[in-house]
Amino acid sequence: MAKIFLNGYMGSGKSSAGETLASQLGYEFIDLDKFIEKEYKMSIPEIFSTKGEKEFRAMEHNSLKKVIDKDENLVVACGGGTPCYYGNMELMNNHGTTVYLKMSADSLVNRLMNAKEKRPLISNKNESELREFVNRQLEKREDTYHQAQYTVKGKDLNVKELASFVKEQIGV
């Protein structure tokens, strides 16, 4: 069974690209955050506020392992931090195809300013705090993101081209 893991910073378009990619490939689509919410019967913001980030990352890791164990072809949109904890990037590289949707900090900040309330790590930040936060996070995470097998430009991503590329790479 083929698994394709989309990685990248929050707001890079993993979920929307993932849904489209899955339908183009005839695969199931899993948004890892939604999977976690269903699994633990709590929203991501609730998990962060009641259990904290450390516990969330452990839950995320366990959920990722469950997704990997599924016996079906999948496109998985991972959370922005997923690859950075518990050896998750190595786990994904060993069990499927990993794609990093790379975007500049400026493009990410523009997208995230309109969707802050759903994102516990940034919900209380103004634009300049958000820009500083995104730059700092990207600096920390970029090395891990670049361990993905493929890197594509996330801004103005053509998912049809991505689907063709992925089909070619995994031989679908």
Image (cartoon, rainbow, N blue to C red):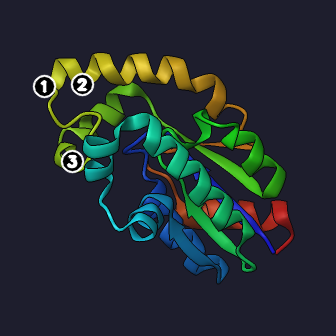
Amino acid bearing label 1:
Asn
Q: How many marks?
A: 3
**Residue drawn 57% across and 59% down?**
63
Which circle marks residue 66 in the picture?
Answer: none
**Residue drawn 83% across and 50% down?**
94
CA gap, disc 1 to disc 3? 12 Å
In the image: residue 114, left or right of residue 53: left
**Residue drawn 34% across and 43% down?**
51
Pointer 3: what residue? 115
Pointer 1: what residue? 126
Give residue 39's position: percent from left, percent from top: 46, 68
Of pointers 1 and 3, the one earlier in the residue sequence: 3
In the rendered image, which quarter contains the C terminus?
bottom right
CA gap, disc 2 to disc 3? 12 Å
Mark 2, other Cα within 10 Å: few <14 / some 14–19 / many ≥20: many
Instruction: Check the image and report above or below for 103 versus 125.
Output: below
Instruction: Check the image and report above or below for 87 versus 13.
Output: above
Camera-nearest residue between 172 and 10? 10
Instruction: Check the image and report above or below for 117 versus 84.
Output: below
Asked whether disc 2 touches disc 1, contact meaning CB atoms under 8 Å apart, the reply is yes
Amino acid bearing label 3:
Ala
Question: What is the secondary structure assignment of the residue under circle 2?
Answer: helix
Amino acid bearing label 2:
Leu
Give residue 35's position: percent from left, percent from top: 47, 67
Q: Quadrant of residue 36?
A: bottom left
Give residue 105's position: percent from left, percent from top: 38, 26
Q: Quadrant of residue 128?
A: top left
In the image: residue 129, left or right of residue 152: left
Mark 1, other Cα within 10 Å: few <14 / some 14–19 / many ≥20: few
CA gap, disc 2 to disc 1? 6 Å
Which circle marks residue 130 in the picture?
Answer: 2
